[in-house]
Image (spheres, rainbow, N blue to C red):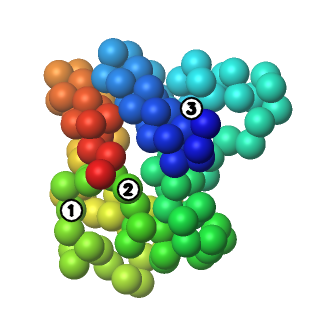
Amino acid sequence: MKLRVYNKLSHEGLWGWLGNNPEKDKEAWPGFVTMRKLKLKLPFVFCFACAEAGYKTRYRARYKYYCQNCPVNFGVSLLEKNESIRRQCLVCTSASSLYAKWETSYYDRKEVVRTAFKIARGWK
């Protein structure tokens, strides 16, 4: 299976599972449990979109290049990102992104579920 297809299907599986298990975190996804048992390399920050963006740019250690090649629509335009932030994902750290919404909605299970499914379907 080509890496892009693998990353896309894994992304959809992870976020679909998170939508069905709103009390869980990304690291608890059964796919990652299996990968650990098989001693396979886990994707950067448990994110197949980041893995895909890093794979496409070949700048795995330079975080600032990830978001411009992210295959997922997180609901934030690249113009909104702050170029000075060098964190896991520039778009995802925007307060208005779907990822930020998912991460901060843990008290509202319905919002967690809704946002997780939006992210699952967001691969461009």
Q: In the image as oriented, which residue stretches furthest toward the right?
A: 39
Quarter of the image that includes the N terminus: top right
Distance from the alpha carbon under mark 2 to that under mark 3: 21 Å
- Out of 30 and 24, give the one closest to the viewer: 30
Helix, strand or loop under label 2: loop
Tell me the residue that label 1 is attached to.
76
Q: Residues within 10 Å of mark 3 (few under 14, many from 20)?
A: some
Say which residue appears at 34% left-offset and 41% top-offset: 103
Question: Helix or strand or loop: what does disc 1 sit on?
Answer: loop
Separation of disc 2 and disc 1 at Cα?
Answer: 13 Å
Residue 3 seen in the figure: yes
Amino acid, disc 2: Pro
From the viewer's perspective, is 40 left or right of 85?
Answer: right
CB within 8 Å, label 2 to label 3: no
Q: Nearer the viewer, mark 2 or mark 3?
A: 2
- The amino acid type found where label 1 is placed reads Val
Viewer-nearest residue: 82 or 74: 74
Q: Which of marks 1 and 3 is nearer the N terminus?
A: 3
Above or below residue 63? Residue 10 is above
Name the residue tied to disc 3. Answer: 27
Q: Quadrant of residue 90?
A: bottom left
- Residue receiving disc 2: 71
Query: How far apart are labels 1 and 3 at the CA level?
Result: 24 Å
Q: Position of residue 88 (x, y in %)?
A: 50, 61
